[in-house]
Amino acid sequence: KSVSTTKSMVDGASGAVPQAAHAAGGTGRLKAVARVLRLTLVLNALVAVAKLVVGFGAGSLALVADGLHSVSDSSSNILGLIALRVASQPPDADHPYGHEKFETFGAAAVAVLLFLGCWEIGKQAVARVFSPSEVHIGSIGFWVVGVTMLINLFTAIYERRKGRILHSELLIADSMHTHMDVWISASVLVSLALGRLGYPALDVVLALGISGVLAFASFRILWQNVTILADTSILDPRKVIEVVRRVPAVTGCHKIRTRGRPHHIFMDLHIQVERDTDTTQSHFIVHDLQDRLRTAFPGLADIVIHTEPSDVGSGFSGDSI
């Protein structure tokens, strides 16, 4: 006798977490992520304005490039807020698994913005080679870069910390985006100092270096989120089998599949029970296993378990394929 059941069938018999609780928890997490993004948006906007005003005034390509990257930071914050608004919508007929992957789309879009910024910086650097100009900057420029670098450092650390706490790949990706500003600002300080010492051509070299660093960062962020969108397996099947093995009535486990994000995982698997197990007994066995799996893997949002009969006395068999 075979039966398939999901967490939505829980009737309270085994104390499984209801879907509404998961939805409420997910909405609260997304609201917390949005609050972090709004704060970083304000900080990034202030930093961008300060860098661009001084950069254009001094004619420093490296400082303007740094300012443009800060603008892209602000743009990614806005894009992230839009993505979060969509991701917070509850499941519907067209999206029965919910909309949370839109947060992942937003993180991937941050990588694209980062790449576009890299392209623009590189293009301007090449143009400067054929049309060189002098850089004039006073002490205010050094102060602006130094202070904004500290603001970027605080923003990046704060955003990454919150991203890890809230399990948000969007915040983590955006923190990488902001963290690059710290290194870029450091290189700009060097560039400005070299310009004062009579080596303005190095401003172009550093701008090209910035472009390369941004290209690498954009690829790294994009790859991390593409693996999620491609439904790469997220849990080790061997660890799942370890949990299944603890249920006395289960004699086997196979066809384990997982996908999603660390805090929002979908799982389906097949288990075997003794041939004389009836449908009611299978129902309670499945719910017992669901509870154990949720305890072991708190990020599980949905579990589908299919039961199959096994040979009497055959012992436990585990096959993750």
Image (cartoon, rainbow, N blue to C red):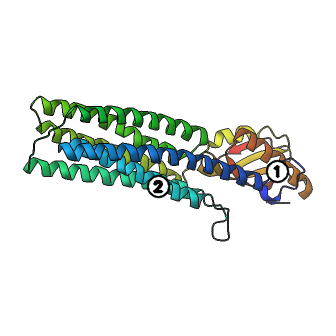
User: Is residue 290 positioned above or below 155 on the image?
Assistant: below
Tell me which corner region of the image, top left, top right, bottom left or bottom right, holds residue 195.
Answer: top left
Q: In this view, does 286 lie to the left or right of 37?
A: right
Q: In this view, does 179 lie to the left or right of 189?
A: right
**Residue at the bottom extreme of this rendering:** 93
Q: Is residue 87 left or right of residue 285?
A: left
Please, what secondary structure does the residue beneath circle 2 have? helix
Residue 27 pos. (x, y %): 66, 53
Tag 2: Cα neighbours inside 10 Å, few (<14), some, or many (≥20)? some
Q: Mark 2 points at which residue?
A: 78
Tag 1: Cα neighbours inside 10 Å, few (<14), some, or many (≥20)? many
Type of amino acid at the residue the image marks with label 2 = Ile
Please, what secondary structure does the residue beneath circle 1 have? helix
Residue 71 pos. (x, y %): 36, 50
Residue at 13 percent across and 52 percent down: it is: 127
Residue at 89 percent across and 58 percent down: it is: 279
- From where the camera sits, is residue 230 visible? no
Which residue occupies the foreground of this view, 147 or 219? 147
Q: Name the residue under label 1.
A: 286
Camera-side mark, 1 or 2: 2
Residue at 63 percent across and 70 percent down: it is: 94
- From where the camera sits, is residue 104 visible? yes
Q: Is residue 209 left or right of residue 286?
A: left
The N terminus appears in which quarter of the rendering? bottom right
Which residue occupies the foreground of this view, 89 or 97? 89
Type of amino acid at the residue the image marks with label 1 = Val
Residue 84 pos. (x, y %): 56, 56
User: Is residue 32 positioned above or below 157 on the image?
Assistant: below
Q: How far apart are marks 1 and 2 (CA)?
A: 43 Å
Tell me which corner region of the image, top left, top right, bottom left or bottom right, holds residue 96.
Answer: bottom right
Residue 198 pos. (x, y %): 9, 31
